Amino acid sequence: MIQFDKFELDNGLKVIVHQDTSTPMAVVNVLYNVGAKDEDPHKTGFAHLFEHLMFGGSINIPIYDEPLQRAGGENNAYTTNDLTNYYCQIPAENIETAFWLESDRMLSLAFSEKSLEVQRKVVCEEFKEHYINKPYGDAWHKMRTLAYTNHPYRWMTIGASLEHVEQAKMQDVKDFFFKFYRPNNAILVVTGNVTTEQVKQLAEKWFGPIASGDAYERNLPMEPVQQKSRFQDVRADVPLDMLMMTWHMGGRLDENYHATDLMTDVIGGGATSRLYEQLIKVKQIFSSIDCYHFGTIDPGLVVIEGKLVKGITMSVAEKAVLDEIELIKNTMMPTHEVQKVINKTESLICFEDMSIMNRAHSLAYYELLGDADLMNQELEKYQKITPELIQQTAQQIFQDTNRNTLYYYSKS
Amino acid sequence: MALDRHKAPVIKDAIDFDIKLKPYQHFVLDNQVEVYTYEGGAEPVMLMDMVFFAGNSYEDKNWVAAATNFLLKNGTTKKNAFEINEAFEFYGAHLSRNCYNETATIALHCLTKYFKEVIPVVSELISEANFPEKELQIYQQNLIQRLSLNLKKSDFIANRFIDEYLFGIDHPYGKYAMQEDYKNVTLADLTAFYDTYYKHGKCIIFMAGKFPSDMQELLNKHIGQLPLNKKVIADVTHPIVSAAQKQYSVVNDASSVQGSIRIARHFPNRHHPDFAPTQVLNNIFGGFFGSRLMRNIREDKGYTYGIHSYIQNHVQQCAWMISTDAGKDVCKPTIEEVYKEMKILREELVSEDELKLVKNYVLGGLLGDLDGPFQIIARWKSYILNDLTDAYFYNTIDVVKSIQPEQLKTLAEQYLKPEDFYELVVY
């Protein structure tokens, strides 16, 4: 059970405080309610590029990192399709430094041309390192455009193409900032050796004077229900054939979310999962195979992806996976198999909650979903899942018309 | 009073922090296996990390140590691989293994309430593993496939080659496995290695987290009665055979859009008096986000997504490594800039201001690194396995607090000479 206090500033900034006196450290986490899904389809990759620019100096502070490092702190950030999250860990005694830095870059960036020019290049190198100069690096790009026809999840956070990143202009940067990086579109979480009183005072002092912006009305195009199975062939210079399949699933607040999560774990999460045991060990059709899901806020995808053992044909591999799926749909799984994945999840949650950093991330994320206290209700929701619920969920998701398949062939 | 946002809030310098490494508890099992523990944390979880002297330094044939470490979880006289995995996973426990140069580990992460359920299975793995033929064959097949994939990646190739140049292909730090090595390993190799280095091997245990009240009894019952620590493991030494040639350019994939750059030199181990002060110099050079390499090559020129320097974590002999992946057309200027930064460190004194920032950063980071029971025991484990005590910890802090620009320049003159470095680009 993670205890916390919650309050809101007049400008709409939500603030959450979780005190832990056993640590000398504190974490200051600022989540902005903007992700790659909020991008213009012609200017993709922008939320992530923007994350880089947030380190290029703010209106009153030329360099973000230096004063933080001087105060013994460390920081990082990440961008997903749903959100952008910035966090720093710092000795609790120096926490005001983090408030000063984070509030100034919420107030306004410096909008330096040099920073934009350099970070465009850095992001292009990141793009190359992870998505071009890597075997199968384009697989997700292809799968997303196959599975999503309308919803902005059809592009990756890094962007749909290098060109979009290369063409980013200063005016785009400014528009983006003042649209999304406003206090009323953000959640501030402070965890560690702090008191609520102290955080209240610091938040009022540093974030209080920042003007709120227009409320952002998110109005994203919905993905229509898929009517027909879709397929795509890819041939590339990779050593092994790969099979990748996805099926549309519900969003993060869907009533079947927890059942879907446990279902993917039963199917392909680790060494006792069905795909691992049957297709890697017993039948030796795949050399690696996993089943997982996006966990995105809007409706996501259940994924099965695996690399084929040399000599096995794609159709044999595909049939083997579909056979396992039929089994999940048509046969009630034993209770102990569900108990196993519930126990795994309990363990995972406990290990995750060990650090004040993870607690800060989770509190911010669940608050974004609607209520930070959802964090404390997760385990209970998992414990209620039954074999029947998993079977129903499997029957709903694993329909052939709901499937997207990428056959990724080795040229050699 | 108006808020002055130009002015940084007052900070307490991390060099004024009184940083303490909390002590471990220690006990010895009936079979003389030493156990180091640190109890703490709010969550009901724990870690048991068993260290065996079973690293690749002890193998006669390539890949035997790693394969033994991996496959000891894939079959015992009582259970097959699935049943073993199930025995852990049903309780949400996770058993990982890792093979290094001197040591190999078996680490259990579990909920405190289920420790008693899973500890017997750990015991079974280190006393009754039986290496089924089929498990070895599947593992070989899958690793050969994975290798063919990794050999497409320039960073994978670069990491292998640079170690080979530094230490030689026959040294534990320099060697790597190829397809034939995987194929050549037999069940007899695994069984023999297991028998000597696990079943009758030398073991040290590190534990952290929340413990059940009968933790010591459980350990003694399940681990303390095994035939461990009976024989002295003979010391092994391997001569370092460094490459004569210093510069390399390898084309692995002609269509590659980036090059993986590695620049490295030999460096002494932790017992050398230069080790601690050089860590400070390394931080200034390329050891963190605000380092000179990062500021120059990423933040000023945009040649790369990241560039780092670090001192390798070896027991016997280390290396100082600079590592980055850069755009194909800017690999050459990237390398030139690395040498330029070395030159500046050799010729100019680091400013007091920059040094103070790095000192604060290092000490603040240390405070964060020691936050939590797993982190504290990991620090102790590293000291104990390197024959160090907490004196090393406090000495390192003193060095960081007191080091002066002149000393850093002297170190740079000694260790940052381009002619001492191996240089490699893999495209």
Image (cartoon, coloured by chain):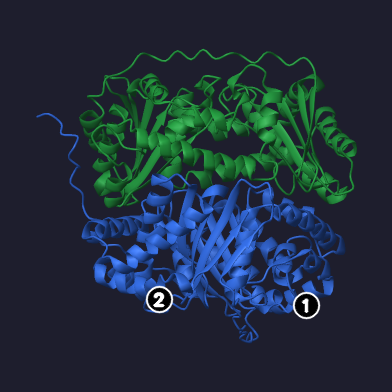
Chain colours: A green, B blue
Q: Quadrant of the N terminus of chain B?
A: top left
Disc assigned to residue B192 = 1
Q: Which residue is mark 2?
A: B389
Residue A244 is drawn in which quadrant? top right
Secondary structure found at label 2: loop
Is residue B400 depicted above or below A73 in this figure? below
| Other residues around mark 2 within 10 Å, as few (<14) / some (14–19) / many (≥20) | few
Q: In the picture provided, is B291 more to the left or to the right than A235? A: left
Check disc 2 and give the amino acid type.
Thr
Where's residue A333, x and y in %? 79, 35
Q: In the picture provided, is A307 more to the left or to the right than B319? A: right
Of residue A156 and residue B108, the one placed in the foreground of this image is A156
Q: Quadrant of the C terminus of chain B?
A: bottom right
Where's residue A116, x and y in %? 40, 34
The answer to whether any part of residue B289 appears in the image is no
The answer to whether any part of residue B188 appears in the image is yes
Q: Chain of mark 2?
A: B
Q: In the picture provided, is B263 more to the left or to the right than A149? A: left
The residue that appears at 60% across and 72% down in the rendered structure is B165
**Could you give the CA–CA distance between mark 1 and mark 2, rounded to whole angstroms?**
34 Å
Of residue B171 and residue A339, the one placed in the foreground of this image is B171
Is residue B92 depicted above or below B286 in this figure? above
